[in-house]
Amino acid sequence: MEINKAVLLVAGEGNRLRPITSALPKPMIPLAGKPLLEHAILGLKQAGIQTVLLIVGYKKEIIKDYFDKVSKTLEIDIKYTTQEEYLGTAHAARLAKEFAWNDPFLLMYGDLLVDPQVFEEIIQEYEKNDVKGLISLKEVDNPQAFGIITLNSENKVVKITEKPTLELNVGNLANAGIYIFDPLIFKAIEKTKKSVRGEYEFTDSMEILIKEFSGDILGYVIKDKFWSDIGLPWQLLEANEYILKNLKGEHHGTIEANVSITGNVYIGKDTTIKTGTTLQGPCYIGNHCLIGPNAFIRPNTSIGDNCHVGMSEVKNSIIFSHTNIPHFNYVGDSIICDHVNLGAGTKISNLRFDNKSIKMTIKGTVMDSGRRKLGAIIGSRVQTGINASIMCGKKIGVNSIIGAHTLVVEDLPPNSLCYHDPKEGLTIKKNPFI
C-alpha cells in the first residue's frame, strides 16, 4: 500500500541545546536559510509524502506561524495537533491516531536530519515486505548509551534492550528514530503502561505489537548516508556542513568591484557584498544582508537574513538573522543566535593550546565534543563591548551583556551582566537593563 502520510514529533524543548532553544524550538533552528524541520519535510516530499502531521508543544506558535506561511510554497499539506503533557514518545505518537487510523504511515522524530534517500529506501523496504512495522537503525560504537535493537536472520526485531551492558552482547544497532507502521500500532500503544521513568515508551509499544499482536517489525540499517539526531550543539555544525555540501551557488544580490568568490556561494535578495570582501564556498548568505567591506567569510558558514558582517572574519559558523558582526571580530566554529551585536574587536577562541578536544557543559555535565575546534554558543539578544574575548566551548545565555575588555572563561546564565572589575576581577550579575 502506498505510503503518503508522515507524523513528526516536534513537541520537545531541546534542553541540551540551550541557549539556542531558549528562544526557538529545536526544529526551527536555521540551517542554510531553512529551519531544520523544513529540510526534513522537503526530504519526505521527495519520497512521495503528501500530508504531514506535526505534533507540536514547546513554542508551538513559532512552528505553526512559519509553516502556515510556507506550506503552499512547499506544496505539501501540513496539519497540527498539540501535545499538552510530555508523557513519553508513545503518548506523543498516540495523538496521531485520528490522522493515520486506516493506512500505514511514516513516523519520525522532528529533530533528525538525514539524507533524503533514507526516506525513499525505507518506504521501498516496507512496501515489499509483509510486515506491520519498520524501524531504522544505525551502527554505534558505544551500544551501552543507546536503545539497542536485536534482529533475527530475516532482519526482524526480536529484542529491544535499553542501554545494555556489554556483557549482554545484544549487538550495536541503535534506534535511528524513523519508523513506518501499520495502524495496528495504535492498539499496541493503548496497551502500553508507564515505564519506571513515568513515561509511555514507544519501544514498549513495539514489543507489544510483536508479542501480543504478532506484528513483525523489520529492521533497516542506514549505511553510508548522513544521519544526525542533533542532540548537542556541535552536531548543528556537522549538519550545517552536510547541507552546505549540497548547496548550489546562486547570486541574487549586489556584488561590488574587487570581491573574490570561490566555490558554491548562495547570496540572497537585496544583499550587498562590499568591495574587498572574500567569500569562500560552500557558504550561505541570506536576504537583506550587508557583507563587508573587507569581510572574510570562510567555508561552511551560514548567515541568516538582515545581518551585517563588516571588516571581520567568520569561519565554519551558523549566524542567525538580525545579527551584527561589524568591526574587527573573529568568529570560528560557533553558533550565534538572532539579534546579537558584537562590539568592535570581540574575538571567540576556538582552539586549545594543547590541541586537545574541546569540552562543553551540557545540563550540568561536562562533555567531550570530540572536536579539536569549537568556539562559543551565543544566545539571542546578547551584546558584547569592545575587545571582549570568549574562550572556546563557552555558552552565553540569552539577553546577556559582556563588558569591554572582558575575558569570558565560564558559561554565562541567561540575563547576565559580565564585566571585568579592576579590583574584583571577573564579575557576573543580573543584567539591570532588562
Image (tube, rainbow, N blue to C red):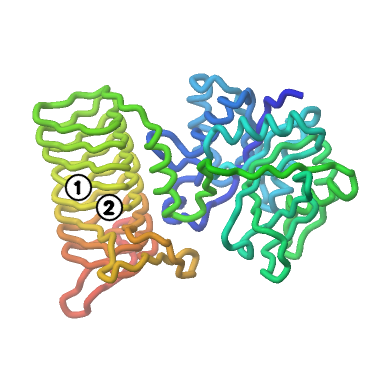
Q: Decide if residue 415 is in sight here.
A: no
Left or right: 331 as drawn, with respect to 362: left
Q: Residue 57 placed where, x, y %?
A: 60, 44
Q: Residue 27 placed where, x, y %?
A: 51, 42
Vertical position of residue 44 compared to residue 358: above or below = above
Pointer 1 with pointer 2, Cβ within 8 A: yes
Q: Residue 130 placed where, x, y %?
A: 82, 33
Q: Residue 202 placed where, x, y %?
A: 73, 50
Quadrant of the rendered structure where residue 215 is?
Answer: top right
- Sort mark 2 into few (<14), some (14-19) or many (20+) by Cα contacts within 10 Å: many
Give, as a three-letter code, the residue at label 1.
Glu
Query: Which residue shows up at 34% across the image and 42% down it?
Result: 320
Position of the N terminus, as image quadrant, is top right
Vertical position of residue 349 compared to residue 1: above or below = below
- Sort mark 1 into few (<14), some (14-19) or many (20+) by Cα contacts within 10 Å: many
- SS for callout 1: strand
